Image: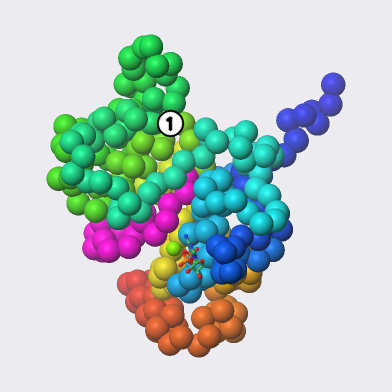
Amino acid sequence: MSDAPSATRLPPAIEVENLTVSYGPTLALLDISLTIEPGRLVGVIGPNGSGKSTLIKAILGFVNPDFGEVRLFGEPAEKAKGRVAYVPQRGSVDWSFPITVREVAQMGRFGHVPWWRDLNAQDRRLSDEALKMVRMEEFAHRQIGQLSGGQQQRVFMARAMAQGAEILLLDEPFAGVDAATERAILDVLERTRAAGRTLVVVHHDLGTAAEYFDTIVLIKQRLYAVGPPAAVLHPELLSEVYEGKLKAFADLERNQTTVKSATAH
Ligand SMILES: Nc1ncnc2c1ncn2[C@@H]1O[C@H](COP(=O)(O)OP(=O)(O)O)[C@@H](O)[C@H]1O
Ligand SMILES: [Mg+2]
């Protein structure tokens, strides 16, 4: 027998085809087509209101497109629901809810457990492994309301991993966290990718995008570019998409300076 089957390529993790989404009269996304291969750490960038969150919601099936479709691992998105998880923005969670870190991670297993039985040893092991993965095992008994913003993000990533999700979608996980926390979250994103997962992360800081992601999606209603950072983060293209908003370039320059000074010693 030939070895052709082993040479067969895996289907892409995410395929978006001719996706158009509007909210009443507001056009949010227009004719977006893109393909994300498994194991990528993807940054979605674009100015405010450019449709980044809408793209995430469309991949999750939270919004109905006017046109177009999303496939996950070659299947219609509805069939692959268990394979994708959303890590919510901090603002969308009730942090006063009396639940511990371990219980949040265990919630990831509920979808796998029939209603008549409790979590078994395997479910508990998988949730504890997920907590270790995000380096939150020592906080297992802590109430979620008593965590820092970055720790809260990491607990929700653990829930997604305990669930066994192969695709994680995060909307601005770095918003409002300090530099040390940003590093800790990035470390978890990288470990998650190293474990073979695909991550799509909405990101607002052009200055760090090239360093954090292996693939960049640049959108403003339309798809302007998708590919490696060096190919996408071109001054002319950014100037077109950000309409010369100076802050974006100041960030980019600051980062290039940082990279230079970091390699200087
Ligand atoms: N639920 C909604 N109802 C009406 N308009 C919305 C809604 N959500 C987003 N929009 C609009 O759709 C566009 C894209 O929004 P969004 O995807 O949130 O952009 P981004 O995440 O890039 O800031 C914006 O013009 C926004 O005002
Ligand atoms: Mg948004």
Q: Is mark 1 within 8 Å of ligand 2?
A: no
- Percent across and percent down for residue 81 are 55, 36
The answer to whether residue 102 of the structure is visible from this angle is yes
Work out which quarter of the rendered image holds the N terminus and state it.
top right
Q: Residue at x 32, y 63 (%)?
A: 175
Q: Does residue 89 sit above or below 76 in this rendering? A: below
Q: Taking 161 as reference, is 242 left or right?
A: right
Find out whether residue 194 is within the magenta segment: no
Image-based side of 174 in relation to 193, left or right: left
77 or 122: nearer the viewer: 77
Residue 213 image position (x, y, % from top left): 48, 59
> Is disc 1 surrounded by few (<14), some (14 to 19) or many (20+) residues within 10 Å?
many
Q: Position of residue 146 (x, y in %)?
A: 14, 45
Q: Label 1 amino acid? A: Gln
In the image, is residue 171 part of the stretch drawn in magenta?
A: yes
Q: Residue 239, relative to residue 181: is it above or below?
A: below
Q: Is residue 107 above or below residue 221?
A: above
The residue lying furthest to the top in this view is: 116
In this figure, which residue is indicated by the disc labeled 1? 163
Residue drawn at 70 percent across, 56 percent down: 67
Picture residue at 51% right of the left edge, 63% below the top = 52
Task: Report the label total.
Answer: 1
Q: Nearer the viewer, residue 254 or 88?
A: 88
Indicate the colouring scheme: rainbow
Assign the C terminus to one quadrant of the image. bottom left
Q: Position of residue 116 (x, y in %)?
A: 38, 11
Residue at far front of view: 24
Range of residues picked out in magenta:
168-186
| Displayed quadrant of residue 252 | bottom left
SS type, badge 1: loop
The answer to whether 81 appears left or right of 260 in the picture is right
Residue under the image location 62 percent in, 33 percent down = 79
